Amino acid sequence: MGLDAAVRCRFWEEGRTRPCPFPQRIQLGTDLDLLELDLPWEGNEEMHRQFDRWRWHCCAHENMWLANERISNWSGVRAFQQALRSAGEARFSTLLAATPMASARAATQVDLDPMAPAPAPVTFREQKRRVRPSAKVD
């Protein structure tokens, strides 16, 4: 499992995306803070495909991700947390508080300034790595 960090853009909330093919069917997903259709996949496959194509190209950010970075695997996260603690837990308290503590899907947002407008949530997610079959060499 890998750990990635992502921030979704707010163009949808700001009304700055291209028109959605199914605006009445959009919902904010519980997984990864992505916009998704409120329809099951089965029986609605073509609508989902059309919606996914729209989401990938509806604004200046591919798939509506303002930022999407590969961080590490969970062992790497634990090593990073340990390095922060070794360097001084008080010095890195905000960063340590924002780093997931469990190997599970978790979303977190760090509020650095209570008077600042709310940014899009930062989403930490586990990602199973897909293994592509290697090409045969003759």
Image (cartoon, rainbow, N blue to C red):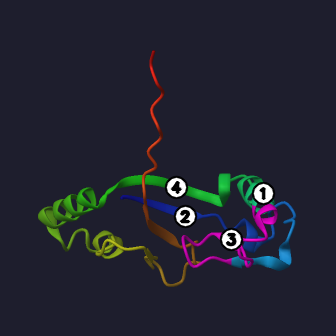
Q: Are marks 3 and 2 in contact (CB under 8 Å)?
A: no
Closest to the camera, between mark 3 and mark 2, is: 3
The residue labelled by disc 1 is 58
Q: Are marks 4 and 2 in contact (CB under 8 Å)?
A: yes
Question: Left or right of 53: which side holds 127?
Answer: left
Q: Position of residue 45 (x, y in %)?
A: 76, 64
The residue labelled by disc 4 is 68
Q: Which residue does the image show at 32% across and 71% down from the upper left?
A: 103
Q: CA distance from mark 3 to mark 2?
A: 13 Å
Q: Position of residue 127 (x, y in %)?
A: 44, 59
Pointer 3 or 2: first along the chain: 2
The residue labelled by disc 2 is 7
Pointer 4 or 3: first along the chain: 3
Q: Which residue does the image show at 20% across and 63% down from the upper left?
A: 84
**Residue 35, numbered circle:** 3
Q: Is residue 40 magenta?
A: yes
